[in-house]
Amino acid sequence: QVQLVESGGGLVQPGGSLRLSCAGSGSIRSINDMGWHRQAPGKERELVATITRGSSTYYADSVKGRFTISRDNAKNTVYLEMNSLQPEDTAVYYCNADVVSLRIGIPVKSYWGQGTQVTVSS
């Protein structure tokens, strides 16, 4: 019913930049909090950044000053601009969204994208 479609991942050299996008579609009335997580090889999934519907943001210390999260409520889309990328940023990046459904009687539910690979290597 609800899908989050990600794009923008790929291979980039250290110091480079990438912009990830994640667009929600389906039976969506509105979206509350949105965010990005990542999971590096051999590590647990970690929070990268979050953004509320009112555009209040939070960043993990490891990405603060380098990454920027933003959203377009009209498009049900969240973005992650990643600058000064380093090998330590290599991970599968997942977007998520807390969705208010158009369907009657459905509570707010958290959805996840399929994940997109970001590889930082020379």
Image (cartoon, rainbow, N blue to C red):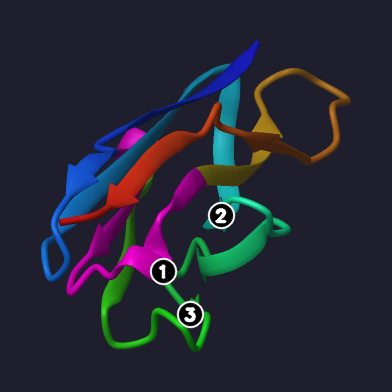
- Magenta range: 74-93
Q: Which of the two discs, 3 and 1, labels the residue nearer the N terminus?
A: 3
Q: Residue furthest top?
A: 1
Return the residue at label 3.
59
Q: Secondary structure at mark 1?
A: helix
Q: Secondary structure at mark 3?
A: strand
Q: Nearer the viewer, residue 48 or 109?
A: 48
Quarter of the image that includes the N terminus: top right
State the separation of the CA atoms marked 3 and 1: 16 Å
Task: Check whether the beta carbons of the residues at disc 2 and disc 1 lie within 8 A of each other.
Answer: yes
State the separation of the CA atoms marked 2 and 1: 8 Å
Answer whether residue 17 is visible to the viewer in this image: yes
Return the residue at label 2.
40
| Residue type (three-letter) at the residue carrying disc 2 | Ala
Callout 1 environment at 10 Å: few (<14), some (14 to 19), or many (20+)? few
Q: Does 84 appear above or below 30?
A: below
| Residue type (three-letter) at the residue carrying disc 3 | Tyr
In x, y percent, where is residue 14?
17, 66
Q: Residue at x 18, y 52 (%)?
A: 18
Instruction: State yes or no: residue 61 in magenta.
Output: no
Q: Residue at x 68, y 59 (%)?
A: 43
Answer with left or right where residue 63 lies relative to residue 14: right
| Residue type (three-letter) at the residue carrying disc 1 | Glu
Answer whether residue 77 is visible to the viewer in this image: no
